[in-house]
Amino acid sequence: MSAPPSAPDAPRRGRAPLPEWAGTATRLVHGERRADFNAGAVVFPIYQTTTFRFPKEHSEAAGDAYLYSRNRNPTVEGPAAILRDLEGGEDARLFASGMAATSAAVLSLAGAGDEVVSLTDLYGGSRSLLRQFLPRYAVQLREVAEPEARSPEAVVSPRTRLVVLETPTNPVLRVHDIARWAAAAHAVGAVLLVDGTFATPINQRPLALGADLVVHSATKYLGGHSDVTAGAVVGPRALLDRIDPHQELGGSLDPFSGFLLHRSLKTLALRVARQNETGRTVVAALERHPAVERLCYPGRASAEEEQLAARQMRGRGGMLAIAVRGGAAAAERFLAHLRIIEVAASLGGVESLASRPAATSHRHLTAGERARSGIDDGLVRLSLGIEDASDLVRDISEALDASAGTVA
């Protein structure tokens, strides 16, 4: 029997760094080229391990070495590097969910005696976090609604240490001026945290507009296939260093989820471009439908927001909301008659989803609070996927007809 072939003397050919002129889609596909880890594999491998050998015997003083996956794991650092590059930040941290990312950021940047300013138009989970936990740490929360939210300079105070902004907002898709909010926050020494989940870095880059940190529920568009739960925070290392201890409490992303996120990011530019186009098509088809009482889409709320969206965003995305004429009962009839679009929570996947925020993401708000935020009982949020746009238009239109009783 012949001996097995010996290992080659020369090291495997490494991957040259991407050229500076490489575009966004190219960088998403190729990611951070790290030949020292992947042993020549084209697809970045899963390091499904909880622990690593110490680089020095009986010593944890290992600097940047991998020691324990709750702290650092090379599989997780792959997609983190892509998001850092995509957002234009110094570094990025990945978490086990979007709420883990948001809570780590908020709770590490606000302390006793501080004031946190936030919009009332936030994802329901984020709003619950601010309301339920900040008072326990003697942090004052100031919630800002329309039209006060259009004058950030009059909202912040010398006590403000953190501003939490979401744009476009969930679920009514209002657009807020990130640069103006950043200037107002910085004038009083506060940090501006922007939730960019709806826009994605393809359509909007908050850091380039002056924000200090951007947070994502990577479960949504970044993951994009409804099969991974993850979150991300991107920004300067000085702020991320303050967030790290909260991540190490147990909210870090596991290697397999990191692998799935890495896989999904490769097609982010393609998926978002398709969803941008589908969003425009569906909005145009629904503008005059008699069963639509109100249509929410980035830029539609006012001429000011249209100008802002055109300046601040590169695309409007695949999210929209419709207030179905007839209230909650009509909205439920609409949902029951959808044939392609799934009725489910979440958003940003390749499949289209529909939900009624008053009964799901914003159910914890009082009826008055929902009304002040524009969340009618008949409001339906639609997350458009990558199906044929004509099929989605037909599905929505026929369900709207059924909601009004105009078809059998």
Image (tube, grey):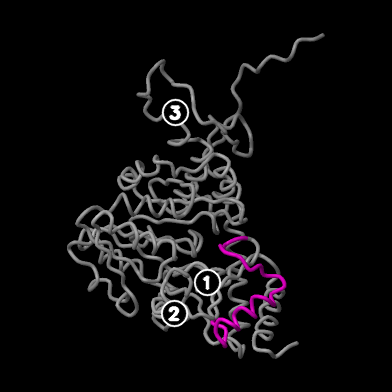
**Amino acid on which the number 2 mark rests in the picture:** Gly
Local SS, label 2: loop
Most distant residue in the right direction: 1
314 w.r.t. 234: above or below: below
Determine crowd level at label 1: few under 14, some 14-19, many 20+ residues with C-alpha closer than 10 A: some
The answer to whether marks 3 and 2 mark residues whose Cβ atoms lie closer than 8 Å is no
Measure the C-alpha gap from mark 1 to mark 2. 14 Å
Residue at the (66%, 67%) spot, across then down: 342
Question: What secondary structure is found at the residue carrying circle 3?
Answer: loop
Q: Nearer the viewer, mark 1 or mark 2?
A: 1
What distance separates the C-alpha of mark 3 from that of mark 2? 49 Å
**Above or below for 342 versus 53:** below
- Spot occupied by residue 251 in the image (x, y as percentages of width and height): 44, 44
In the image, 360: left or right of 159?
Answer: right
Give residue 93's position: percent from left, percent from top: 43, 45
Q: Which of the 4 image quarters holds residue 58?
A: top left
- Residue pointed to by mark 3: 67
The three-letter code of the residue at mark 1 reads: Ala
User: Which label number is shown at residue 197?
Assistant: none
Q: Residue at x 56, y 76 (%)?
A: 380
Q: Residues within 10 Å of mark 3 (few under 14, many from 20)?
A: some
Q: x and y percent of residue 47 in the render? A: 56, 33
Highlighted magenta segment, given as a residue range: 323-349
In magenta segment, residue 3? no
In the depicted structure, whether residue 52 falls above or below residue 248: above
- Residue under circle 2? 374
Disc sitting over residue 359 in the figure:
1
Q: The disc labelled 3 sits on which kind of residue?
A: Leu
**In the figure, is residue 97 to the left or right of 241?**
right
